[in-house]
Amino acid sequence: MTPEVQPLRSVMVERYVTPLREGGSMPAVVEADDLGLYVLKFRGAGQGVRALIAEILSGGIARALGLPVPEIVLATLDPELARTEPDPEIQDLIRASGGLNVALDYLSGAVNFDPAVDEVTADFASRLVWFDTLVSNVDRTARNTNLLVWHRRPWLIDHGASLTFHHAWNGTVADPGKPFAPTGEHVLLPRADGLAQVDAELAALLTPAVLQAIVAAVPQDFLDQAGVPAQAYADYFQARLADRGRWLQGAIDARG
């Protein structure tokens, strides 16, 4: 069954709760006007809006594939909130991030996935490796799994470092089937013995209509600042799926 892609909800950030000082982009836990807690990814940090685009696209693709991802929302931030923060670095970050940002539902009580302790099925590992190879995600290694365990289930977080190709990209689709070398360091690659078996099923879920709906969730403001048209992303993923034999074989070979 083809998945239904839901539009992203919008919230207004009302309170900065605490920074999460893991990684260079310094996301933060914030409270929004729906009384929910979210992990806010700032447009003024690190790679800017391209990291936010990656968060929306990769998160949307993961959800379409049935992988567990916290809800992604568009979060509007008032730069005036900087006045209540004593840390000058946080003040600067908030001021540089006024307007639309991206946030993920905060999974209260979740703990980091430990590959030495936490078990996942070979089927889950295969699906995750397939997905991360599709979206060129460098951030799923034993050093930084970007997996949380919440209610005894693994959850995917932090896809800002995926879509590595687009940080110096003008929208041209070139060599879309290129194998993704960092897959060899994927934390779950040793358990992913069903890559060939899950391939057809997963690829069938990402129809052109589904990809277009996922890309449509990216705010035009982000695309304008990145200088890349929405259609370029849809074209890229359609071409990468059409030529997936090469990158899939690269992932299978990496296990050997």
Image (tube, rainbow, N blue to C red):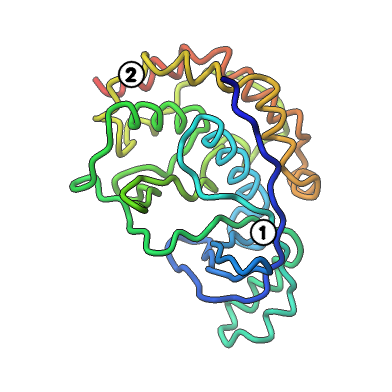
Going from the N terminus, do you reach mark 1 or mark 2 first? Answer: 1
Quarter residue 7 falls in: top right
Seen from the viewer's position, the closer of residues 165 and 239 is 239
Counting the numbered discs, the total is 2
* Residue type at tag 2: Ile
Label 1, residues with CA under 10 Å away: few <14, some 14-19, many ≥20 = many
x%, y% of residue 28? Answer: 54, 68
Residue at the image point whose x is 56% and y is 31% from the top: 64
* Residue type at tag 1: Arg
Circle 1 sits on which residue? Answer: 43
| Alpha carbon separation for disc pair 1 and 2 | 36 Å
Residue at the image point whose x is 51% and y is 29% from the top: 65
Quarter residue 22 falls in: bottom left
- Quadrant the N terminus occupies: top right
Q: Is residue 206 left or right of 247 when viewed as pictured?
A: right
Label 2, residues with CA under 10 Å away: few <14, some 14-19, many ≥20 = many
Residue farthest to the left? 116
x%, y% of residue 46? Answer: 58, 58
x%, y% of residue 174? Answer: 63, 21
Mark carried by residue 252: 2
SS class, disc 1: loop
Position of residue 209 relative to residue 101, above or below, is: above
Q: Is residue 72 left or right of 187 when viewed as pictured?
A: right
Seen from the viewer's position, the closer of residues 116 and 43 is 116
Q: Is residue 79 left or right of 112 when viewed as pictured?
A: right
Q: Is residue 31 left or right of 180 when viewed as pictured?
A: right
